[in-house]
Image: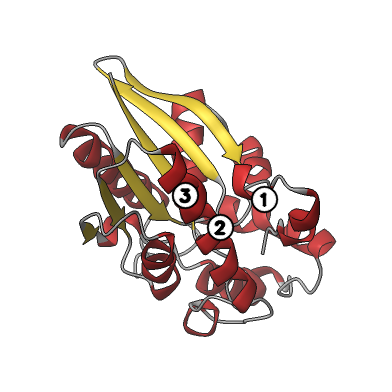
């Protein structure tokens, strides 16, 4: 059995309305990554870092700075384009992009269901294709041995959780909404498949003076 550790990137550009605008860390996102790096270096046991190619993922990986461990990029760990799917949902059903946490919580399951049902059209990566590439990336990282840290995004982590636990889309959407920036998740992979062993840990933020640094968006 091989265990891999997945980390969500730090807080990105909140208030963005496109993938390009969203794809950069905020000042708080950089600080979250630095704190997490301090914790992981003190914990030890990691020998390599793999991140997606998105700026927010690669920058988080660099700031975590696991003693200059080798850093590899894998585009299969990139997030799906939520903003594009949201525009499709608005065009089809007139549902506007959310403007606050409450409306976003209602928006996520609608977007995921549009995507799962094939409503995004053939020009957009399918739900099934995304799931397969994410699972393939995780399997390849695990195949190289223990000690890997993967820096990725919410959709990737939620998808692996759903696969490990056999969750339906609605429950997956609820999990999607609970993944904090720079939270730590662990999976074990063996001959029987994928197993979730830790979800949403934030030991680097579990200090009285860092409570306000716990962010979802």
* Residue 207 in view of the camera: yes
Q: Is residue 38 above or below residue 54?
A: above
Task: Specify whether 77 is left or right of 196.
Answer: left
Label 3 secondary element: strand
Q: CA distance from mark 2 to mark 1?
A: 8 Å
Q: Is residue 109 above or below residue 203?
A: below
Q: CA distance from mark 1 to mark 3?
A: 14 Å
Per the image, the residue denoted by label 2 is 35
**Do the residues bearing badges 1 and 3 touch, measured as CB atoms within 8 Å?**
no
Residue 88 in percent (x, y) is at 56, 72
Per the image, the residue denoted by label 3 is 7
**Do the residues bearing badges 2 and 1 touch, measured as CB atoms within 8 Å?**
yes
Residue 16 in percent (x, y) is at 62, 81
Residue 202 in percent (x, y) is at 62, 44
Q: Residue at x 45, y 43 (%)?
A: 42
Classify residue 126 by image quadrant.
Answer: bottom left
Label 2 secondary element: helix
**Mark number for residue 205?**
1
């Amino acid at each position: 059995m091989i265990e891999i550790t997945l980390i969500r990137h730090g807080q990105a550009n909140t208030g963005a309305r496109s993938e390009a605008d969203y794809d950069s860390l905020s000042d708080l996102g950089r600080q979250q990554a630095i704190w997490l790096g301090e914790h992981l270096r003190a914990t030890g046991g990691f020998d390599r870092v793999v991140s997606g190619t998105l700026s927010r993922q690669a920058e988080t990986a660099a700031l975590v700075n696991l003693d200059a461990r080798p850093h590899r990029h894998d585009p299969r760990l990139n997030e799906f384009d939520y903003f594009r799917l949201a525009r499709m949902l608005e065009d089809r059903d007139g549902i506007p992009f959310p403007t606050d946490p409450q409306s976003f919580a209602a928006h996520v399951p609608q977007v995921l269901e549009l995507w799962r049902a094939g409503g995004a059209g053939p020009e957009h990566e399918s739900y099934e294709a995304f799931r397969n590439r994410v699972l393939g990336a995780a399997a390849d990282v695990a195949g190289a041995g223990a000690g890997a840290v993967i820096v990725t995004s919410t959709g990737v982590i939620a998808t692996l959780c759903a696969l490990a636990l056999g969750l339906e889309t609605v429950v997956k959407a609820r999990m999607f909404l609970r993944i904090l920036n720079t939270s730590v998740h662990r999976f074990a992979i063996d001959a029987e498949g994928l197993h979730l062993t830790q979800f949403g840990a934030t030991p680097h933020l579990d200090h009285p003076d860092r409570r306000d640094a716990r962010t979802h968006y």
